[in-house]
Amino acid sequence: MTYAIGSAGLIPMTYAIGSAILIPMTYAIGSAELIPMTYAIGSAVLIPMTYAIGSAVLIPMTYAIGSAVLIPMTYAIGSALLIPMMYAIGSAVLIPMMYAIGSAGLIPMTYAISSAVLIPMTYAIGSAVLIPMTYAIGSAVLIPMTYDIGSTVLIPMTYDIGSTGLIPMTYAIGSAVLIPMTYDIGSTGLIPMTYAIGSAVLVPMTYDIGSTGLILMTYAIGSAVLIPITYDIGSAVLISMTYAIGSALLIPMTYAIGSAVLVPMTYDIGSTGLIPMTYAIGSAVLIPMTYAIGSALLIPMTYAIGSAVLVPMTYDIGSTGLIPMTYAIGSAVLVPMTYDIGSTGLIPMTYAIGSA
């Protein structure tokens, strides 16, 4: 496959994603060119699609990820356009979704992670917008600004991201233990806290989110394991962290998604700091990774989605840097890939999604 992202060049193509179905395709990424397309991701379902990456062009789309569910979708990458979307992750659940990447746009959303639970959600990334939310991680429990990680415990919760508002809260992660809590996200106020994540263990904790203050913490998510942690969200401070969500360890600054693999990780949110990372999605494969969020830094990466395939990858979000990449989604197929989002760089590519 060879195509151009960031120009009006049309790209005649034929390939199969997630099955043996041949897919005649022509599209342009990074311009206003509409791209009629048909393909299948993770199944034999044909998916008519039209989209544009790197411009303000809206992209009505329909596709399926990991199932035969059709997913009408419209989105824009590289602009402040709102993106109504429907998709399913790891199940046949349709997920109406709308969000904006790279702006302060509010994002009404509904989605389900590893379950059939619909999750109405609204949030803002990179701004001081309040975010009423309802979601469930790893279970069928609905959680309005109330959530539960690793169990069916309902957790009434209220918080504010990007401001100095105090946040009275009570929640339980991975167990039925209620945890009275008050903290402030987006200020330098320290937050004395006691709670239990994943067990009945009380965890004295003090941290600060949204400043440069380091946050010594110990907690367990999804088990009785205590987890010393220090991190800072909203500054250039590096954050070494280890935690587990739902017994199948899920650890940012060390985490694994969908398996018990420990993943040492270091990252920085809200600065241009490079972020060495290792993680696994849906398997026991360790994935050394380095990336930057909110800058033009290049990001060498290796990861596997839904399989044990290692995927060396390098990409750049929010700049014109070329992105050599290799990855596999839902199979053992290696996919050498190079592309550029938001520029005129040509992008030779070959990949397989959901099959060999």
Image: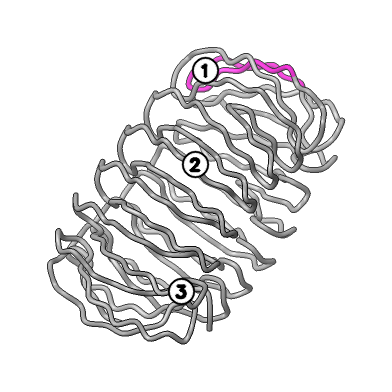
Q: Residue at x 61, y 45 (%)?
A: 117
Q: Where residue 282 appears, x then y in whole percent? A: 64, 63
Q: Residue at x 55, y 40 (%)?
A: 119
Judge left or right: residue 244 versus residue 26: right
Q: CA distance from mark 3 to mark 2?
A: 23 Å
Q: Residue at x 24, y 46 (%)?
A: 79
Q: Secondary structure at mark 3?
A: loop
Amino acid at the residue labelled 3: Val
Magenta-drawn stretch, dominant element (helix, strand or loop)? strand
Q: CA distance from mark 1 to mark 2?
A: 32 Å
Above or below residue 36? Residue 185 is: above
* Mark earlier in primary sequence (3, 2): 3
Q: Nearer the viewer, mark 3 or mark 2?
A: 3
Camera-side residue of 144 and 251: 144
Q: Is residue 294 magenta?
A: no
Amino acid at the residue labelled 2: Thr
Q: Where residue 336 appears, x then y in whole percent? A: 41, 79
Q: Is residue 189 magenta?
A: yes
Q: Which residue is mark 1?
A: 188
* Mark earlier in primary sequence (1, 2): 2
Judge left or right: residue 166 versus residue 71: right
Judge left or right: residue 146 versus residue 246: left
Amino acid at the residue labelled 1: Thr
Q: Which residue is mark 2?
A: 110
Camera-side residue of 6 and 213: 6
Q: Quadrant of the N terminus?
A: bottom left
Circle on res. 45: 3
Q: Mark 2 and mark 3 in contact (Cβ < 8 Å)?
A: no
Q: Which residues are magenta?
A: 180-194
Above or below residue 10? Residue 176 is: above
Above or below residue 14? Residue 258 is: above
